[in-house]
Amino acid sequence: MDPHLLRTYVTVARVASFSEAARELGYTQSAVSQHIAALEQDLGAPLLTRRPVAPTAAGERLLEHAGPLLLRLDAARADVVRIAAAPEHGLTLAAAPTALTADAVAALPAAGVTLRVLPRDEVPAAVATGTAGIGLVDGLAAPSDPLRLPDVAPLTTRGVGEEPVCVLLPTGHPLARRRGLRLADLADARWLDAPDAGLPIAHLRAASGGRGFRPALRYDGTDVRTLTALAAAGHGLTLLPRSAAKDVPGAVAVPLTHPRVVHRTELVCAGSPGGAAAALAKALGARG
């Protein structure tokens, strides 16, 4: 498939309008229509209904493939450009909110850094497509086990830290005086669904067998302080690395004792880091 036609199709499907897609892509509406018609002819199936503009069943299936395909094309272009280009003196770091531990912040160079705090699932893609030179991602894992990251491109990952995890509860919560908590015992509790700021509920379900953990409130943001304030106010529990959960006003951090998991942070890069990125990796003690 011609990637130019595929990009046009994805844009039309996203904005649900041929004319709006034309404005966004800088084409004429006629050109957009021709792109869609050529792609439909190539695949031998209608991809869009016209009134209203919406994907057909075949079009929906194509969209499932289109995102990863276009991302890999962008990653390939960025990888080649990265190899051919002169070394950069500055550093653009993409990091998940809870991957920015005190050690990570202390290791940043004194100048020349652009820090982008992103949802954790977007960090590998930012590194792959060259919008960030290096990334920091995190998640739950068994001690010394690597994280399972999206397969967006051939990326190199190196572990840079592990620490215990804690359940953050309001000080008046019945379990706040416990010395430790089992995750399975909290499956029916009220939880905060904050996939971009805390450890996602999906990770909790996976660690405890895949059941329970119904969200009481969803927070679509990347500010860890807002997440901890919501937990302290009683809107739901959240699981955080110990460094992020301790000393929160109005809340208590109770260690998770079972299952035996840790908060793991990994450095993500394309190939071998150089310049400022290599210096940061060395400062963090990056290891395979």
Image (cartoon, rainbow, N blue to C red):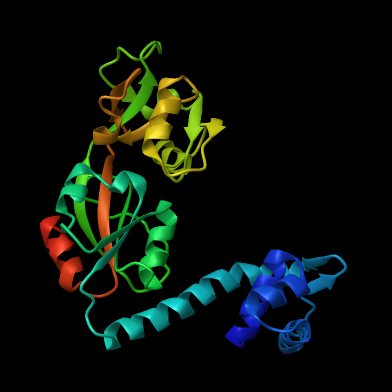
Q: Is residue 65 left or right of residue 287?
A: right
Q: Is residue 211 left or right of residue 28?
A: left
Q: Nearer the viewer, residue 258 or 1?
A: 1
Q: Residue at x 48, y 39 (%)?
A: 210
Residue 288 location (% of width, % of height): 18, 62
Query: Residue 64's quadrant in the figure?
Result: bottom right
Q: Residue at x 74, y 89 (%)?
A: 38
Query: Residue 197's quadrant in the figure?
Result: top left
Q: Residue furthest right?
A: 51
Give the vertical position of 199 relative to 175 (above or below). below
Query: Residue 102's quadrant in the figure?
Result: top left
Q: Nearer the viewer, residue 221 or 61?
A: 221
Q: Residue at x 34, y 15 (%)?
A: 176
Residue 224 location (% of width, % of height): 37, 38
Q: Is residue 85 left or right of residue 35?
A: left
Q: Nearer the viewer, residue 109 or 145?
A: 109
Q: Nearer the viewer, residue 153 or 36?
A: 36
Marker count (numbered): 0
Give the vertical position of 71 relative to 37 (above or below). above
The N terminus sits in image quarter: bottom right
Q: Residue at x 41, y 36 (%)?
A: 208
Q: Residue furthest front?
A: 111
Residue 65 location (% of width, % of height): 59, 72
Residue 46 location (% of width, % of height): 80, 78
